[in-house]
RNA sequence: GCGCCCGUAGCUCAGUCGGAUAGAGCACCAGAUUCCUAAUCUGGGGGCCGCAGGUUCGAAUCCUGCCGGGCGCGCCA
């Protein structure tokens, strides 16, 4: 709808060639915005103020020139000048009627934009280490990433969702040892469990489920003798070494791989139940086995971006704005995690993605500069990597902040949260705040099935509309859609105008939310829309005796139902027919 | 110490490339249902947009400094 106004301005400009230089590359559409106050019309353009300086004229004078040139049309009732030089557009009722019919004819496609070839987007999110179940913080990443992905797709982009599985390195050894020790425990070999091991109950479950054919228990005293006194890191290191020698590399690897796959699969199930799915689970191990790390380092070497110092191989990250150079191959010959990450991001670009979006926890922000430096060093643009950082989640119960450490025994997994508040409320609350704001997740509000729960407020609007059509059938009436479409001019109540206006904003909200990777815009919009509907519902009966008016009102609320359903779909929240 | 993020109503937060009188929910106060779901609606009070400068026709928004909070500064992952 915004484009109607932009087009009128564009046409007017065509008749004022003397302004061409002043306009330059200014996007006309960017000057157009919704008015905050209905007395200012439907849309306002600040183009006269924007052009004032380059054109050397005062804003109101320029605005008058525009108004003079803006052609009349059946979509615009009135154009006037207000304040310091705003050009206000009052659109015609016919323009809103056309929009309502467009909503109904497009249905689930309403708000979706035409396909865009570029950029092809790779969206990586969650990527939690496969060492245990997802916690409530990961839930925010999952809901946010999934919704941003939906929004980008709705905005016309091709989006591929990826979960990077950190299935290599020392933490996998620690996982393997943890499972092995719990398995030994179940066979009667009791030793103190290492402090640095993974202590959750799920480790015992894995130990009881995996295939341990051919693996022999070890004597407790013998094992204890191999454990040095001291630091927890020293202890766990000794146990890893011991596990590898006792079991042999093959059997230890068998335990390790089964353990990580068990956890990874559990995470995948958890997310799927949450409505969050990925196009690919990208294994870090595959970078090694596929020699992708060597390939990426070779590219850097070729470009002169690596050097040797103190027996290690360093990447010249400072050449690209990082604070210090970074080691990619350690003195002991092992490649660093950073080397894997360079290889992974290089691989993303090699697979043809133009824009890489990594959703990371804010505690990883120090990592962004070096990964971006890596991409730049390989010849890509810094802007091709975008990293929205997620701030932390705090759970509140009875107005008090909950402790979320595993040890405290209070709940902290995503599964427990979903079980307590439900998927709809969880998805909704997680994306209701900007990613760079800390999220205070109030369990009591999310659970409440009444009053102040915004999820139900929106869902209730949808259910109420569905209920109107059920009531219609009960009264043996039918919605004559053709007559409704033809009778929209009868909708003259202020609540009807307000609802139609809000409905017409939906495509703009999708674009805004997608472009800013900001799902909260959609959340706030849906609340506004539900509010407009509830207000209308309370002010006027829809099922009235006048058939034409009734059909027109049923047409309007059908459009509202469509937009609410479309918006909730993007959020991953259900749109119930009854509540 | 250095770097990144945040600071808006009592509380939780929106605020679009700088735009008109800074918005919403909760809480608080006063009302609305013989009628399609009251999980609803209507009205009301409540603001030094952390502080101080600067940029300009115009600043919550951009720049600088300061104050307060979070996070990060490994040949860990």
Image (tube, helix red, strand yellow):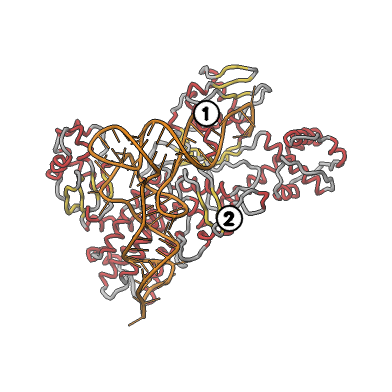
Question: Residue A363 at what x, y percent from top left?
Answer: 55, 38
* Disc marking residue A225: none
Residue at the extreme left of the image, as rendered: A68
Work out whether residue A127 or residue A409 is closer to the camera in this orientation and state it. A409
Which circle marks residue A417 in the picture?
2
Dot 2 surroundings within 10 Å: few (below 14), some, or many (20 or more)? some
The answer to which of A492 and A225 lies nearer the viewer is A225
**Circle 1 sits in a helix, a strand or a loop, which is it?**
helix
Is residue A500 or residue A279 the one in the foreground? A500
At 25% across and 56% down in the image, what residue appears?
A96
In which image quadrant can residue B71 be found?
Answer: top right
Task: Give how far apart the Cα atoms at labels 1 and 2 are.
Answer: 35 Å
Question: Whole-percent x and y of residue A70?
Answer: 15, 45
- The answer to whether residue A292 of the structure is visible from this angle is no
Count of numbered marks: 2
Q: Which residue is mark 1?
A: A370
Residue A135 higher or lower than A449, as above or below: above
Q: Chain of mark 1?
A: A
Viewer-nearest residue: A341 or B53: B53
* Residue B68 relative to residue A51: left or right: right
Residue A63, compared with residue A314, is above or below; it is below
């Amino acid at each position: 709808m915004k484009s109607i106004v932009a087009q009128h301005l564009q046409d007017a400009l065509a008749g004022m060639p003397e302004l061409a230089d002043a306009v330059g590359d200014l996007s006309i559409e960017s000057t157009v915005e919704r008015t905050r106050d209905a007395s200012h019309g439907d849309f306002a353009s600040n183009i006269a103020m924007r052009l004032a300086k380059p054109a050397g004229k005062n804003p109101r004078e320029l605005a008058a020139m525009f108004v003079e040139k803006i052609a009349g049309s059946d979509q615009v009732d009135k154009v006037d000048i207000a304040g310091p030089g705003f050009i206000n557009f009052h659109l015609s009722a016919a323009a809103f009627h056309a929009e309502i019919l467009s909503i109904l004819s497009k249905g689930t496609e309403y708000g979706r934009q035409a396909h865009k070839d570029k950029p092809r987007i790779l969206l990586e999110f969650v990527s939690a280490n496969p060492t245990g179940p997802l916690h409530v913080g990961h839930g925010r990443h999952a809901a946010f990433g999934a919704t941003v992905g939906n929004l980008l797709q709705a905005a016309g982009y091709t989006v591929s969702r990826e979960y990077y599985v950190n299935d290599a390195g020392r933490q996998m050894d620690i996982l393997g040892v943890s499972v092995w020790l719990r398995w030994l425990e179940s066979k009667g070999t009791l030793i103190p469990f290492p402090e640095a091991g993974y202590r959750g109950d799920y480790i015992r479950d894995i130990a009881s489920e995996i295939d341990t054919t051919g693996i022999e228990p070890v004597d407790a005293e013998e094992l204890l003798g191999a454990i040095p006194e001291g630091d927890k890191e020293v202890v766990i290191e000794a146990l890893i070494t011991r596990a590898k020698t006792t079991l042999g590399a093959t059997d230890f690897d068998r335990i390790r791989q089964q353990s990580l796959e068990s956890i990874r699969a559990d995470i995948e199930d958890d997310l799927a139940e949450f409505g969050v799915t990925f196009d690919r689970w990208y294994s870090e191990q595959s970078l090694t086995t596929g020699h992708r790390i060597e390939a990426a380092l070779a590219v850097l070497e070729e470009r002169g971006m690596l050097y040797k110092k103190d027996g290690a191989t360093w990447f010249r990250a400072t050449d690209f704005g990082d604070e210090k150079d970074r080691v990619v191959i350690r003195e002991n010959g092992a490649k660093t995690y950073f080397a894997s990450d360079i290889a992974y991001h290089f691989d993303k670009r090699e697979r043809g993605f133009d824009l890489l979006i990594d959703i990371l926890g804010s505690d990883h922000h120090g990592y962004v500069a070096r990964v971006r430096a890596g991409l730049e060093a390989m010849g890509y643009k810094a802007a091709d990597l975008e990293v929205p950082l997620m701030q932390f989640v705090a759970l509140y119960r009875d107005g008090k902040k909950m402790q979320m450490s595993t040890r405290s025994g209070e709940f902290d997994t995503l599964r427990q949260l979903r079980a307590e508040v439900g998927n709809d409320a969880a998805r909704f609350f997680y994306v209701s705040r900007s990613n760079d704001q800390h999220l205070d997740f109030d369990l009591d509000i999310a659970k409440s099935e009444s009053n102040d729960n915004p999820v139900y407020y929106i869902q209730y609007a949808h259910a109420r509309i569905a209920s109107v059509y059920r009531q219609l059938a009960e009264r043996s009436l039918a919605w004559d859609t053709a007559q409704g479409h033809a009778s929209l001019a009868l909708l003259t109540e202020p609540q009807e105008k307000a609802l139609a206006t809000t409905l017409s904003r939906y495509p703009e909200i999708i674009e805004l939310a997608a472009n800013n990777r900001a799902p909260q815009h959609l959340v706030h919009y849906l609340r506004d829309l539900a509010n407009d509907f509830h207000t209308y519902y309370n002010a006027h009966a829809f099922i009235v005796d006048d058939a034409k008016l009734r059909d027109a009102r049923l047409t309007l609320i059908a459009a509202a139902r469509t937009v609410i359903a479309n918006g909730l779909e993007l959020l991953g929240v259900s749109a119930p027919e009854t509540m």
